């Protein structure tokens, strides 16, 4: 028997309509690439989304199912694209501006973008590859000054485009399973692959992560959205801000620690997100130049790579700001877990609590996690048994875009993440590595993430990345690439070994150390171990 409830499609249009109806006075504030500040309301944004819908339909010939690319920073117009494009049934394909020219060309041709909305400051990156782009009919320039010159063909100006359109637009009735957005993986593990999101997945992901167990957003908040809109839909935050009535502040290209601190101060931000390297930079800048007044920032949500316990502790002790650890992937919309303590943890000591908070956390209703050991059996939930993390749920991809290759999926319907982890008896998941980053020494697994986290708590170390190097006797041994902290001298190898020996077994402690000026990073700010392996590991059998 079917329930007798209305069939109300969960689409991005319902989020936009709700945001306008209930929170029309809430604000979107943008710091543009030239540093100027722009402010408008959800209500004004709503009307521009309708103009955009008219422009897409009448002027750009965009139809249901068409791909519309964005190549842009975080700002108001990019939020309009997040709603206006899927609103008419087209797909908002956010293109990562930090990929190589070759990858960008591949992604645009593979997705078959018909139009690309591009920030004026990013135009030179597309000019280089425009002749190779097979499907793009128009480029729409955002934030472009008068008399802006470009070699891109068929350009239009975003503001002119909107100015000539009516605010009246009737959203078409969409199926909640229609595609709404697309993002390619950042290619850390090979050629980028497309994750095609649906309206339903986008809605459920955003509605779930508003929860106090996750992002913890409500209508009293003002959030700084540092996670780029060109990466996994800015973790869905532009959707959850309209759902929760949270003011959103967009930094565009003002991502240097000093610029972000200024925005945090000026806009009285209380919630924010970002990858660990951003927060590491902000912490160091605040340490150097402590703000005159205590920041209003209460907590920052961190994912993308592991948030070291040492950073959580330092931020909290020095500035009273809480780091909340989360985990996710492009393929999981992205948030899969978040880590907050529960009432049962209240009696624990600070260091015991910290140990839990440095884990990636518990999953959300609508998702399931399991850990599969090397021998194919299910790992016990004991916080020790390690294996590959599998995930399934309402906002996890069922396949990559335009491919029949199902090697990342199991026959019984799980997505294989390629992450290695443990889950404890309370459901807290802890990533120990990616399968390809694991170090197997003398038959024993060594976690590079645990070593990195420990090394980064050393007062003389700013960053540490650990990779496997071939070894005749042990098959592999860990090598630690170290970046020395500002104004510190190099720690000695003996000192580092002694420091790690407090927490690690002898076979786990690296004896190989190299000192580098910076850890190479991927397009989204993660340690790029591929580059390190090329530099220090390949062909160096010792
Ligand atoms: P890519 O797969 O191209 O690197 P993603 O941004 O989708 O792009 O990366 C997802 C991966 O990032 C996860 O599979 C995991 O390895 C890593 N990751 C994400 N969040 C965390 C975290 N909190 N701790 C450790 N690793 C993380």
Image (cartoon, rainbow, N blue to C red):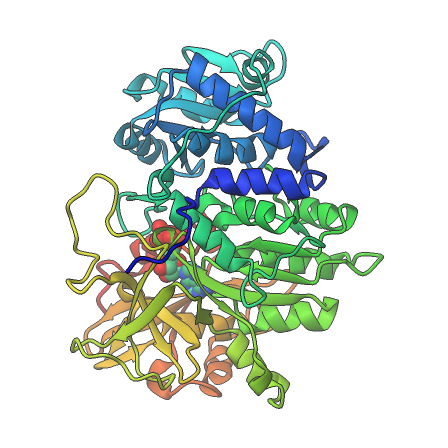
The vertical placement of 526 against 339, above or below, is: above
- Taking the image as four quarters, which one is ligand 1 found in? bottom left
Q: How many marks?
A: 0
- In depth, the one of 118 and 439 nearer the eye is 118
Quadrant in the picture for the C terminus: bottom left
Determine whether, in the image, residue 372 is placed left or right of residue 274: left
Q: Is residue 241 at least partly visible in the picture?
A: yes
Q: Residue 311 at what x, y percent from top left? A: 59, 68
State the residue at coordinates (45%, 32%): 87
Q: Residue 294 at what x, y percent from top left? A: 81, 61
Q: Residue 185 at what x, y percent from top left? A: 34, 46
- In depth, the one of 179 and 455 nearer the eye is 179
- In depth, the one of 276 and 470 nearer the eye is 276
State the residue at coordinates (55%, 38%): 16
Q: Quadrant of residue 511?
A: bottom left
State the residue at coordinates (27%, 20%): 134
State the residue at coordinates (52%, 66%): 325
- In depth, the one of 335 and 7 nearer the eye is 7
Quadrant in the picture for the N terminus: bottom left
Determine whether, in the image, residue 20 is placed left or right of residue 427: right
């Amino acid at each position: 028997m079917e329930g007798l409830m209305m069939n109300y499609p969960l689409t991005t249009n319902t989020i936009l309509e709700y945001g306008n109806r209930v929170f029309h006075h809430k604000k979107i504030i943008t710091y543009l690439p030239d540093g100027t500040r722009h402010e408008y309301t959800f209500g004004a944004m709503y009307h521009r989304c309708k103009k955009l819908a008219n422009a897409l339909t009448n002027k750009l010939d965009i139809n249901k199912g068409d791909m519309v690319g964005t190549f842009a920073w975080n700002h108001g117009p990019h939020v309009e694209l997040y709603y206006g494009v899927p609103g008419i049934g087209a797909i908002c394909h956010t293109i990562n501006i930090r990929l190589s020219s070759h990858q960008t060309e591949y992604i645009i041709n593979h997705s078959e973008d018909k139009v690309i909305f591009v920030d004026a400051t990013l135009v030179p990156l597309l000019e280089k590859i425009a002749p190779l782009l097979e499907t793009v009919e128009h480029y729409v320039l955002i934030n472009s000054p008068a008399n802006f010159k470009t070699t891109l063909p068929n350009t239009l100006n975003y503001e002119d485009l909107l100015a000539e359109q009516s605010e009246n637009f009737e959203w078409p009735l969409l199926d909640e399973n229609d595609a709404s957005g697309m993002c390619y993986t950042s290619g850390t593990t090979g050629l980028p692959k497309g994750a095609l999101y649906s309206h339903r997945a986008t809605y459920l992901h955003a509605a779930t992560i508003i929860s106090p167990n996750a992002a913890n957003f409500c209508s009293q908040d003002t959030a700084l959205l540092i996670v780029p809109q060109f990466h996994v839909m800015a973790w869905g935050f532009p959707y959850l801000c309209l759902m929760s009535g949270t003011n959103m502040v967009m930094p565009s290209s003002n991502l240097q620690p000093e610029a972000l601190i200024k925005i945090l101060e000026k806009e009285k931000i209380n919630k924010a997100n970002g990858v660990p390297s951003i927060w590491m930079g902000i912490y160091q800048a605040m340490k150097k130049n402590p703000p005159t007044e205590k920041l209003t920032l209460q907590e920052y949500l961190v994912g993308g790579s592991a948030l070291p316990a040492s950073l959580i502790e330092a931020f909290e002790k020095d500035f009273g700001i809480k780091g909340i650890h989360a985990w996710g992937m492009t393929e999981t919309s992205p948030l899969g877990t978040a880590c907050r303590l529960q009432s049962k943890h209240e009696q624990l000591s600070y260091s015991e609590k910290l140990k839990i908070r440095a884990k990636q956390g518990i999953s959300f209703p609508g998702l399931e996690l399991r850990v599969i050991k090397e021998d194919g059996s299910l790992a016990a939930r004991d916080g020790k048994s390690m294996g590959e993390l599998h995930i399934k749920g309402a906002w996890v991809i069922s396949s990559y875009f335009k491919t029949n290759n199902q090697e990342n999926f199991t026959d019984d319907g799980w997505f294989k993440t390629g992450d290695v982890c443990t889950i404890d008896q309370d459901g807290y998941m802890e990533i120990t590595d990616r399968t390809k980053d694991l170090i197997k020494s003398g038959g024993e697994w060594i976690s590079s993430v645990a070593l990195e986290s420990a090394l980064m708590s050393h007062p003389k170390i700013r960053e540490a990345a650990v990779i496997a190097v071939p070894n005749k006797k042990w098959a592999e041994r860990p090598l630690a690439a170290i970046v020395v902290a500002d104004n510190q001298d190099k720690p000695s190898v003996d000192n580092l070994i002694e420091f790690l020996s407090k927490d690690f077994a002898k076979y786990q402690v690296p004896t190989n150390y190299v000192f580098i000026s910076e850890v190479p990073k991927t397009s989204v700010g993660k340690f790029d171990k591929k580059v390190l392996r090329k530099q220090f590991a390949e062909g160096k059998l010792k």
